[in-house]
């Protein structure tokens, strides 16, 4: 993207997130009914309402669309610019009244997440950025952790993965593990240096991680999939291997840690 198109894209993302925040204000976290989709993932009226407003605010002619709450239209595969959104990442937390959910919006160009915005309305946090402009946190320039050692690092883990026992292998590790909902929110926190590392040990969909990955990379941080590849989006299947992200100076150590802790299935 050129700087002009970056500014226009970021303005569109910001406006869409503010519109989404207004829609979410009509619902009360912790006091909302949830239905359950195949695979036992919850969905609420809030997810659907935010999806509708994001589509209205973001989508222009010639652009593709991939959202958790919209039936996938594979015509997106023919588009060079595609919006990848999760109207409400962390729906379980939203339903439970835990302030770890967010609205997640990414612009993908030719398979790369080049701009993103993540808003957590419960904590009043807004993360916005692009590869051309860097990242802001609540309007102020931000950068990822400059920590050089895993010793004492703050690692944000998936609450559900911790519950299932997948993080038991790190119980005696020399870093602090904090379980948290919403992978998008965890990535946003890493992009702004509010945590050092996050990684997930299970596959995720593009809409879960595209905006957060764009923010981490835009801030100067490091992102890879669990098979140690750069993140590529707008694939026919939206499912990606798990992923890891950190500040730039921890990349080598984290890559080794993840490789040793995760053996991909054959």
Image (cartoon, helix red, strand yellow):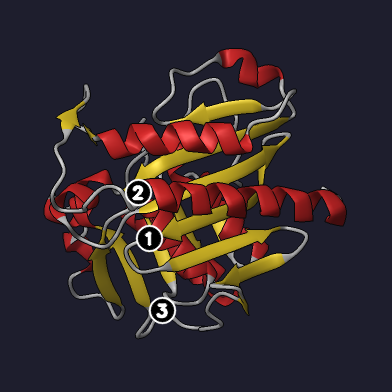
Task: Name the spot of residue 230 as percent of width and height, x first.
Answer: 61, 47
Q: Earlier in the sequence, mark 1 or mark 3?
A: 1
Q: Secondary structure at mark 3?
A: loop
Q: What residue do we see at 19% from left, 75% from top? A: 172
Cα–Cα gap, marks 2 and 1: 8 Å
Q: Is residue 146 above or below residue 261?
A: below
Instruction: Pick whichever, 10 or 162, lies toward us.
Output: 10
Cα–Cα gap, marks 1 and 3: 31 Å
Q: Is residue 41 above or below residue 221?
A: above
Q: Secondary structure at mark 1?
A: loop
Q: What residue do we see at 37% from left, 34% from top? A: 49
Q: Which residue is mark 3?
A: 150
Cα–Cα gap, marks 2 and 3: 37 Å
Q: Which residue is mark 2?
A: 24
Task: Name the spot of residue 31 as percent of width and height, x first.
Answer: 13, 49
Q: Inspect this view and state whether residue 200 appears.
A: no
Q: Residues within 10 Å of mark 3 (few under 14, many from 20)?
A: some
Task: Name the spot of residue 160 as percent of width and height, x first.
Answer: 19, 50
Q: Secondary structure at mark 2?
A: helix
Q: Quadrant of the C terminus?
A: top left
Residues at circles 2 and 1 in contact by the CB criterion of under 8 Å: yes
Q: Is residue 48 left or right of residue 248?
A: left
């Amino acid at each position: 993207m050129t700087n002009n198109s970056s500014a226009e894209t970021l303005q569109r993302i910001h406006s869409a997130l503010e519109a989404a925040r207004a829609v979410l204000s009509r619902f009360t976290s912790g006091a909302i009914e949830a239905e359950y989709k195949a695979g036992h993932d919850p969905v609420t009226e809030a997810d659907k309402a935010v999806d509708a407003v994001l589509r209205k605010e973001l989508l222009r002619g010639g652009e593709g669309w991939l959202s958790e709450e919209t039936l996938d239209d594979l015509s997106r595969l023919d588009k060079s610019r595609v919006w990848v959104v999760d109207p409400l990442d962390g729906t379980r937390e939203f339903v439970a009244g835990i302030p770890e959910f967010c609205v997640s919006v990414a612009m993908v160009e030719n398979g790369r997440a080049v701009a993103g915005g993540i808003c957590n309305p419960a904590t009043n946090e807004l993360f916005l950025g692009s590869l051309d402009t860097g990242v802001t946190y609540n309007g102020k320039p931000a950068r990822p952790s400059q920590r050089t050692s895993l010793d004492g690092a703050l690692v944000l883990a998936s609450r559900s993965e911790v519950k299932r026992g997948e993080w038991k292998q790190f119980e005696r590790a020399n870093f602090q593990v904090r379980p948290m909902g919403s992978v998008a929110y965890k990535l946003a926190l890493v992009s702004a240096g509010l945590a050092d590392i996050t990684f997930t040990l299970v596959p995720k969909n593009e809409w879960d991680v595209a905006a957060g990955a764009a923010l981490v990379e835009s801030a100067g941080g490091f992102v890879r999939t669990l098979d140690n590849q750069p993140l590529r989006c707008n694939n026919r299947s939206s499912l990606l291997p798990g992923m890891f992200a950190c500040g730039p100076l921890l990349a080598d150590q984290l890559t080794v840690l993840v490789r040793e802790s995760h053996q991909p299935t054959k």
